[in-house]
Image (cartoon, rainbow, N blue to C red):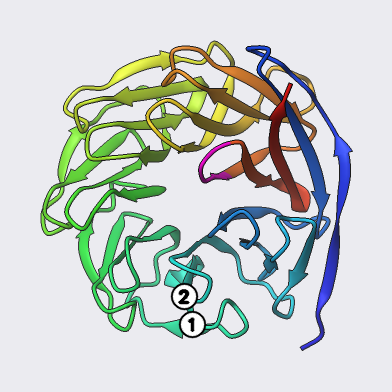
Amino acid sequence: MKSILYFFMLIPLLFTTPDNQFKTHIFKCNTIPDCNLNDLYFINDQTGWTVGDKSAILKTVNSGMTWELTNEPGDICYYAVHFVDEHFGWIAGENGMILHTTDGGKNWNPQNSDTEKWLYEIKFIDPDNGWAVGSGIILHTSDGGTSWKTQLENSTYGLYSVCFTDLKNGWVVGGNTILHTSDGGEHWIVQKENSPVCLYSACFVDSLNGCVVGDYGHILKTTDGGNNWQLVQSGRTIWLSSVCFCNRNVGYVAGVLYEDLSTKGILLNTRDGGIQWTEETVSTPLYTSCFGRGKCGWVDGADGSIYKYLETPD
């Protein structure tokens, strides 16, 4: 298969020094114009993947400096990608599609999800146990995706995000609802419903501390496993599409800023568990983010845009 390299454009977009201890830099990488990138995942500071529409699957092995298109263009929309190490990974997308690789994305093989519903996120806790969520459905596998079992199917839920901290404790969000399981998904309970806005993304750093984001700048935080949720207003009219916390204090939220006449992307950063937020803006909408230990991360979104976020000492 012919490989295509897309080069990282070192264009500093914005610099801030919110606490005079470090500088933040955002660099833009142009990949595939007119192709929306819906998700990305880095297994370490060097190796990552991103997926989107037009059957796009791209990989980097040098921290985003260059990206390689690993498959032929097509008309399939991929919504989610997740890896447990440099070899084993999964992709989920439209019509219940799930793909699996055991060689770092050189080859992708379809898995039978036994559904035609669109799947918006897929996450694995280890090489065997994973969950995929989508249009009113939660799927689980305990054998690496060889077989998938439906754990919940409800047409009233449009589910967009899933997060597990261990084999037992997990959360799923979508629409105006937050669901929780304490037994690996055998039973799901409603922790919060009738939210005034649609919720799109959840991230838990342990079984107690988590964050959920959604429309109109809504940020919900819990410190007791979701029994109680505190509303943290971002103060902006924004669509928050992705949240990623590195630990209890350091977190990042990506989304779309609607206050300007031209749509822009926004990245929020907190270093005190969500009490205060600083922000960076970019020229394109942002859909997902991936931050590991902090200091370095990536966000992607519309028009093939990928941005690398880097903190350096002041």
Q: Is residue 262 magenta?
A: no
Residue 241, position as x, y percentages in the image: 53, 37
Q: CA distance from mark 2 to mark 1?
A: 5 Å
Q: With respect to residue 232, does 30 lie above or below?
A: below
Q: Residue at x 27, y 27 (%)?
A: 194
**Amino acid under disc 2:** Phe
Q: Quadrant of residue 267?
A: top right
Which stretch did the figure color magenta? 289-294
Any part of residue 159 in sight: no
Residue 128, position as x, y percentages in the image: 29, 73
Q: Residue at x 37, y 29 (%)?
A: 248
Q: Residue at x 43, y 66 (%)?
A: 84
Query: In this figure, which residue is indicated by the disc labeled 2?
Result: 88
Residue 160, position as x, y percentages in the image: 41, 48
Q: Quadrant of residue 176?
A: top left
Front in this rendered view, residue 118 or 15: 15
Mark 1 Cα shell of 10 Å, populated few (<14), some (14-19), many (≥20): some
Query: In this figure, which residue is indicated by the disc labeled 1?
Result: 102
Q: Is residue 77 left or right of residue 292?
A: right
Q: Residue furthest bottom?
A: 1
Position of the N terminus, as image quadrant, is bottom right
Position of the C terminus, as image quadrant, is top right
Dot 1 lies on which element?
A: loop
Q: Is residue 291 magenta?
A: yes
Q: Is residue 63 left or right of residue 277?
A: right
